[in-house]
Image: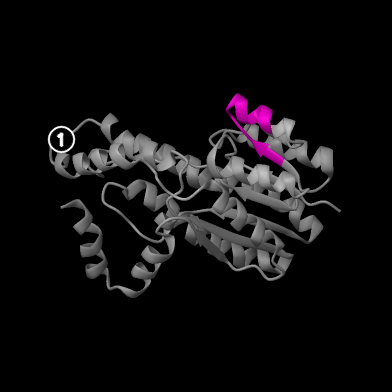
């Protein structure tokens, strides 16, 4: 029986690359795409495109209902949709921070709640949550984004323990720097904030570097391959990471004391 997969955030980048790969590997793929070109590409390749907004429960419920109506099951939920906004804690409006958490954590959590009863009934399933290396490390001006990703890490760990008795696996995906435009847009939004003037030096350094180099990371297919590998594994790991700087920075965070790691990060902004 072909496995049925529901993917969020497939308008571009990692989500779209993963949808392409899993369709080519003969999975039954339902993928949410808010951009028309991605929507039509998924359909043309043999997938089933959906319109899902992570801040709108009605669209999430409709998507789950559609998959169950068509296929009778959901074998894999790949929670990939996310949003990012960098900026100093003092200058970031709390409404923006709440929106970030609504999309990155609470939307992900609600969709998972809607899918779990169907997986419990099947006594099987896999829930994959996209975190980030930013869920383990931190950079200046990224407090709210990193907080949302750290939350996904802890939330997923608890979920894994709760799902184990029901035969449901929980896997965390931690991309490094991936060439999708996501990081570039996230950092670029710093310029949209009303400035106090107190953080202009570090903001200008980050914006200048972002303008010169953009993402310049690994291909999104690197993560698509990682997702495919995790799904094929008989005993998948709880976490997978890949992409530019992912291994080096995670090792540094694991082994360096906090103050030494702080110095390492701040040295990039002198």
Front position in the image: 203 or 58:
203
- Magenta segment: does it hold 34? yes
Depth check: give the residue in front, 154 or 146.
146
Write down the residue under mark 1.
196
Q: Nearer the viewer, residue 102 or 208?
A: 208
Q: Residue at x 67, y 42 (%)?
A: 20
Q: Is residue 218 magenta?
A: no
Q: Residue 175 appears at what percent x and percent y?
A: 48, 54
- Toward which corner of the image does residue 43 lie, by quadrant? top right
Please rate how many residues cluster around mark 1, counting C-alpha atoms within 10 Å: few if below 14, some from 14 to 19, many from 20: few
Q: Nearer the viewer, residue 75 or 247?
A: 247
Relative image position of residue 1 (x, y in whole percent): 86, 53
In this view, 91 is above or below 123: above
| Quarter location, residue 52 | top right
Task: Classify 63 as above or below 2.
Answer: above
Colouring convention used in this rendered image of the protein: one colour
Q: Is residue 13 left or right of residue 193?
A: right
Q: What residue is shown at x 32% (from left), y 35% (from top)?
A: 188
The residue at the point 60 percent across, 64 percent down is 160
State left or right for residue 203 relative to residue 221: left
Residue 162 falls in which quadrant of the image?
bottom right
Task: Kindly identify the residue that appears in the image at 67 percent across and 39 percent down.
Answer: 31
Res. 29 in view: yes
Q: Secondary structure at mark 1?
A: loop
- The extreme right residue here reads 1
Estimate the x, y position of residue 65 in percent, counting from the top left: 75, 38
- Residue 96 percent across, percent down from the top left: 37, 35
Provide the residue span drawn in magenta.
30-41
Say whether residue 61 is left or right of residue 270: right
Please, is residue 122 above or below residue 200 in the view?
below
């Amino acid at each position: 029986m072909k496995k049925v997969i529901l993917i969020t955030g497939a308008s571009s980048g990692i989500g779209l690359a993963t949808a392409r790969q899993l369709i080519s590997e003969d999975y039954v793929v339902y993928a949410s795409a808010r951009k028309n070109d991605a929507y039509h590409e998924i359909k043309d390749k043999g997938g089933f495109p959906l319109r899902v907004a992570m801040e709108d429960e009605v669209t999430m419920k409709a998507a789950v209902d559609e998959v169950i109506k068509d296929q009778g099951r959901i074998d894999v939920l790949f929670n990939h949709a996310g949003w990012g906004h960098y900026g100093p804690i003092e200058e970031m409006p709390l409404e923006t921070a709440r929106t970030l958490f609504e999309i990155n954590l609470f939307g992900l959590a609600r969709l998972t709640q809607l899918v779990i009863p169907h997986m419990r009934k099947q006594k099987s399933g896999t829930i994959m949550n996209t975190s980030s290396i930013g869920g383990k490390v931190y950079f200046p001006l990224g407090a709210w984004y990193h907080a949302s990703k750290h939350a996904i890490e802890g939330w997923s760990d608890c979920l894994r323990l709760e799902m184990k008795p029901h035969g449901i696996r929980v896997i965390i995906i931690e991309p490094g720097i991936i060439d999708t435009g996501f990081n570039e847009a996230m950092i670029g939004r710093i310029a949209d904030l009303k400035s106090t003037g107190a953080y202009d030096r570090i903001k200008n350094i980050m914006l200048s570097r972002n303008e010169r180099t953009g993402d310049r990371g690994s291909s999104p297919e690197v993560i698509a391959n990682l997702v495919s590998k995790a799904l094929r594994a008989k005993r998948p790991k709880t976490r997978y990471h890949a992409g530019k700087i992912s291994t080096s920075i995670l090792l540094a965070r694991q082994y360096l004391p906090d103050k030494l790691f702080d110095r390492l990060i701040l040295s990039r902004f002198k």
